[in-house]
Structures are given as structure tokens and as C-alpha cells.
Amino acid sequence: MEHTPAAGRRARMAQALRLETTSGALLLAAAAIALIWANSPWRESYADLMALRIGPEALHLDLSVAAWAADGLLAVFFFVVGVELKHEIVAGSLRNPRQAAVPVLAAIGGMALPALVYVGVVLVGNDPEALSGWAIPAATDIAFALAVLAIFGRGLPIGLRTFLLTLAVVDDLLAIIVIAVFYTSGVAILALLGALLAVAAFAVVVRTRWARWWLLIPIALVAWWLMHESGVHATIAGVLLGAVVPAKAIHGEAEPRTHAYEAAVRPWSTAIALPVFALCSAGVSVADGGGFAELAAQPVLLAVAGGLVVGKLLGVLGVTALVTRLTPLRLPDGIGIRDLVPVALLTGIGFTVSLLIAELSFDDAGRTDAAKLAVLIGSGVAAVLAAPLLRWDAKRQRSADENEDGVADAPQERIGG
């Protein structure tokens, strides 16, 4: 074991990169840089860099920098999502169907209502060609949402974080299914079967005693390339690879490999994959042509922003209220409907997955830029509204039976405690 000062610094840096607040800060910084650069006197250099094509043409991988960020680097983030999903389903908050039912139903409501808001706005705005973007406001950015909760939710019950994490993980799972089903134009069956075989090989190797990164990474790259060749969005390979990692300790190991692999890959996702994707995707130019006024005239902008803020709030809060009032299902101990107003707003922080779906939804730059700008505006408004509500909620007196199940709540650990 290495115990040098350099090793200590690397360990501290890796630990910092696993923090939700670090991930949120890096994403925000990258998005800000992209916006400033894309609207500066040097905006042509930003556009040229995003359009620069690199990669081996023989493998059909001569992609633009922007495409590499969305198809390649984002697969690293989706691998982490896949690992989290696997752990939550096998050993975490999704293991008990009764406990998971409320956040799962809230996630479904939190996707359906934003989609309905979006469809309603674009139809009223007489832009039926924009209907393909219905899924843009349906996604929640786990990193950003948990970062805001960690900063402003100090003192609230830790169960609220678990509820938000469960909701966001289910949200991401549904968004992944949406991308695979609705945003895949054509499928090359042989390439898809090859990708699934590569995932199966990864699943076999990752369960062995001799699983090593230098063996797993080449298999993962083959799975990613074949998924890209198949026409299914390449990030789906990342999810599938993460989902086959064992979530229970094997071979006498002290912890499940989902924990070990998440700890190993998350710093790369936080420090490189997500910030670079944000840098490549958030650079919406409002300095050229009609600028902001032209983008604001697109019904897509109001549809996406309204879906993220209003749709998410009504969907999550409304479904949770109905479920807990009309069925025997209840929120976890220590959590009440009052806590879900800021949490519902936090789910309106779309960002990463919403930006990805915006890129997949339209063929024209006008609607795409309007959608991306709306994701940034809507996510920002949701975060700004949620922050003071979290602080206010944390200072309020809590009842002995906050979830109103007729049984006094068990003692609760606190966020930041």
C-alpha cells in the first residue's frame, strides 16, 4: 500500500470529486464558461472546436468534439448511473417495493406532467413540429439536485435525501428507456446483438476473482462501439455495463463491487465527463442574428422551462399527495408533504440528461438552441426557488408523526449532521 504525500493528495482529491457539491460546482462552472465563450468575440472558435472531427473513420468514429462528449464521455456518467441503479434495486432504497412505491410513483408523475405541459405549450404556440422534444423537461439531474440539497438542506431528515435519490434514479431509468425507445431512428440488429454479447462478457468477467481494469475497459469499449454502430444511443451501453456489476459482496470481499466501481469511476465522471459535456452542450449563442429575442419566440423555450419548473412541481407533489391520501402507502418516517415542495422543485433541475435529449430531439439549430437555453433557465429557476424553501423547511418545528401513518416517527439522522 502506498503511503506517500502524493498518494494522500490523490486520495483527498478523489474523495472531493465524489462529493455532490463538487460535482454541482464543476457542472455550473463548465456551463458558465460555455455560455460566456459562445457569446464572446471568440464565439467562432467555440463553434469551430465543437465541429472539429476526430477519430478513426474506418470504425465510423470520425465524430465531432460535441458528439464525442455526448456519445463517448457521457457513457462514463451513465455507467455510474447504472451502478447506482443496480445497488439501489438489489440492496438499497428500491429493494423494498412498499418503501420505494411512493418515490417511484412520484417519479412517474414527475415525468408525465412536464411532458404534458410541454405538449400543451407547443400546440398552443402552433409549433407541432416541436412535439419531438416532449421528453426534454422530464429528466432530473441527480448530481445538481443532490448538490443543492446538500448545501441548503442541512438539518433536514436524511430520509429526504434518500427519497430524492430514489426518485432521481427512477427518473433517470425512465429517461434511459425513453432515449432507447423514442430517440433511436434505426437499429442494426447484428451490431446490437454484438453489443449485448460484449455486455454479457463484461458481466462474466466482472464477477470473477481476476477482474481487473485492464481487462474490463477493453470489453466495455467494444460494447460501447457496437452499441454506437447499432444506432441505439451509445450511452445505453454505459447503463447496461453498470447494471451487471455485482451489488452483493462476492469472493469474501468486504464490500460489493458496485461500491468499489462507483468509487473508482465517479471521480472521472465528476472531473472530466460531466464538465466537458456541459462545456460542449451549454454553449448557446444569443449574440448572433436575433439573439435572445429570436430564441424566446420559439414555443420550445417556454415549453421546456415551464415543464421543468411547473410540470415537475405539480407532477411530483400532486402524485405524492394523491397516493398518500388515497392509498395505504406513506412517506418514510420524518418526512411530510411539506418537505416535498422544495424536493419537487429540485427535480426540475434537468441539466445533463435534458441537454442530451435536447440534442437528440430536433434537426434544426433554432429549436435545439432554444431548448438548451430553456434547460439552463428552467434548471436555474428551480434551484433558486428550492434553496430558500429548503432553509425555511429546515428551521420549522417538526411533528412527532410527520408522515401521518399513525405511528410516531423514529429518530432521524440529519443532512450535514
Image (spheres, rainbow, N blue to C red):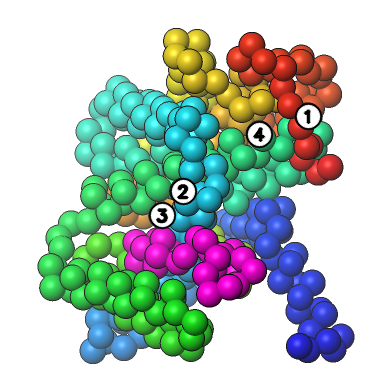
**To which quarter of the image does residue 30 belong?**
bottom right
Q: State the extent of the magenta-drawn residues as a range.
A: 236-263
Question: Taking 256 as reference, is 116 left or right?
Answer: left
Q: Is residue 238 magenta?
A: yes
Q: Amino acid at mark 4?
A: Leu
Measure how far apart labels 3 and 4 are at the Cα level.
27 Å
Say the numbered circle drawn on residue 160.
4
Q: Comparing marks 3 and 4, which lies closer to the viewer?
A: 4
Say the numbered circle drawn on residue 89.
2
Which residue appears at 44% of the width and 14% of the height? 327
Q: First in sequence: mark 1 or mark 2?
A: 2
The secondary element bearing badge 3 is classed as helix
Q: Residues within 10 Å of mark 1 (few under 14, many from 20)?
A: few
The secondary element bearing badge 1 is classed as loop
Measure how far apart labels 1 and 3 are at the Cα level.
41 Å
Which residue appears at 61% of the width and 43% of the height? 145
Q: Residues within 10 Å of mark 4 (few under 14, many from 20)?
A: many
Q: Residues within 10 Å of mark 3 (few under 14, many from 20)?
A: many
Q: First in sequence: mark 4 or mark 2?
A: 2
Which residue appears at 48% of the width and 43% of the height? 95
Q: Amino acid at mark 3?
A: Leu
Q: Are marks 1 and 2 in contact (CB under 8 Å)?
A: no
Q: Comparing marks 4 and 2, which lies closer to the viewer?
A: 2
The secondary element bearing badge 4 is classed as helix
Q: Which residue does the numbered mark 3 point to in the structure image?
A: 356
**To which quarter of the image does residue 387 belong?**
top right
Q: Position of residue 3 (x, y in %)?
A: 83, 87
Q: Which residue does the numbered mark 1 point to in the structure image?
A: 411
Q: Position of residue 112 (x, y in %)?
A: 36, 29
Measure how far apart labels 1 and 2 are at the Cα level.
25 Å
Q: Is any atom of residue 60 visible in this view?
A: yes
Question: Taking 261 as reference, is 25 left or right?
Answer: right
